[in-house]
Amino acid sequence: MAWGLWRVPESRLKALGDPRGRDILEIGCGAARWSIALARKGARAVGLDLSSAQLAHAARLVRRSGPRVRLVRGDAERLPFRASTFDLVFCDWGAMTFCDPYLTVPEAARVLRPGGRLVFSTSSPFRTVAQHRRTDRLGRRLLYDYFGMHRVEYPGEVNFQLPYGAWIQLFAKNDFVVESLAETRPGPGDKSTYLRPSESRWARHWPLEAIWRVRKLAPGPRGPSAGPAAGRTRPGRATRGLRPWRPGAGPRTASS
């Protein structure tokens, strides 16, 4: 199991914790390789994807691999599960990149048990404002507005991204507390099969990828930073007036 664009081993990153005996949901599972690996380690794993073709491929891998993995066709913006079903919801460049976070984060909070975690890797906001949306090239100039970013359209693809402050507010409104944010940085000799060499060089200077780990608070008195449970509202811009927040440094990362 390895994370993100530079394939940082989960054994080094330790983003998911011990999977044994836990109910785990992978959203946007694709071939379900993560779910298969976690099932081998003792998890009760469920892989969800919207693509029937991806799930058919995943089913073949599950049959060959041995461990039991439940595969479900569904939308991460409308999860087909009861409340408080899982101990962990996660993805590695999966549904949290391609679905609206103002829908996926409340859904993850709903299906997680108190104390459960949402963990996901996705693009960094730095990449979003510096990558040309027609040519896909990264440069040293900021090309797009930071404030108000949400739906990001590329030729043939739609991604979603928020400013850091908007992410933190969205987590708080859904009873999540941020435990860590790893902004991956490749070493001088590190290569990625997903990127051009120029993009890896770019990522030595600015974060191209981020891995969030947030935990759902248990019911009880709220601290001053916690907000009311969020509905399915979609604020157009990040609210101003937040105190500065510095994400913790983290190790590098990659895709399963």
Image (tube, rainbow, N blue to C red):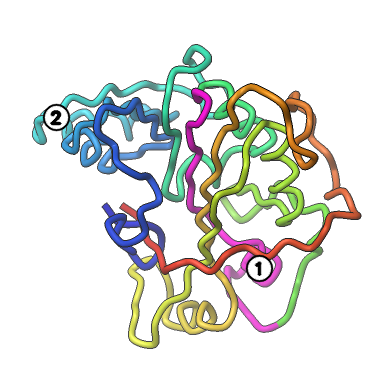
Q: Quadrant of residue 17?
A: top left
SS at mark 2 in the image: loop
Q: Position of residue 218 (x, y in %)?
A: 58, 26
Q: Position of residue 142 (x, y in %)?
A: 75, 75
Q: Amino acid at mark 1?
A: Phe
Disc 1 target residue:
126
Residue in view at x 40 percent, y 63 percent? 253
Q: Quadrant of residue 245?
A: bottom right
| Residue 20 located left or right of residue 196 | left
Magenta-span inclusion, residue 128? yes
| Residue 231 located left or right of residue 128 | right
Residue in view at x 48 percent, y 32 percent? 116
CA gap between label 2 and label 1 equals: 39 Å
**Span highlighted in magenta in the image:** 112-140
Q: Position of residue 222 (x, y in %)?
A: 73, 31
SS at mark 1 in the image: helix
Q: Quadrant of residue 176?
A: top right
Along the line of sight, the residue nearer the viewer: 131 or 46: 46
Along the line of sight, the residue nearer the viewer: 221 or 111: 221
Question: Of marks 2 and 1, which one's residue comes earlier in the chain?
Answer: 2
Disc 2 target residue:
67
Q: Amino acid at mark 2?
A: Pro
Along the line of sight, the residue nearer the viewer: 136 or 95: 95
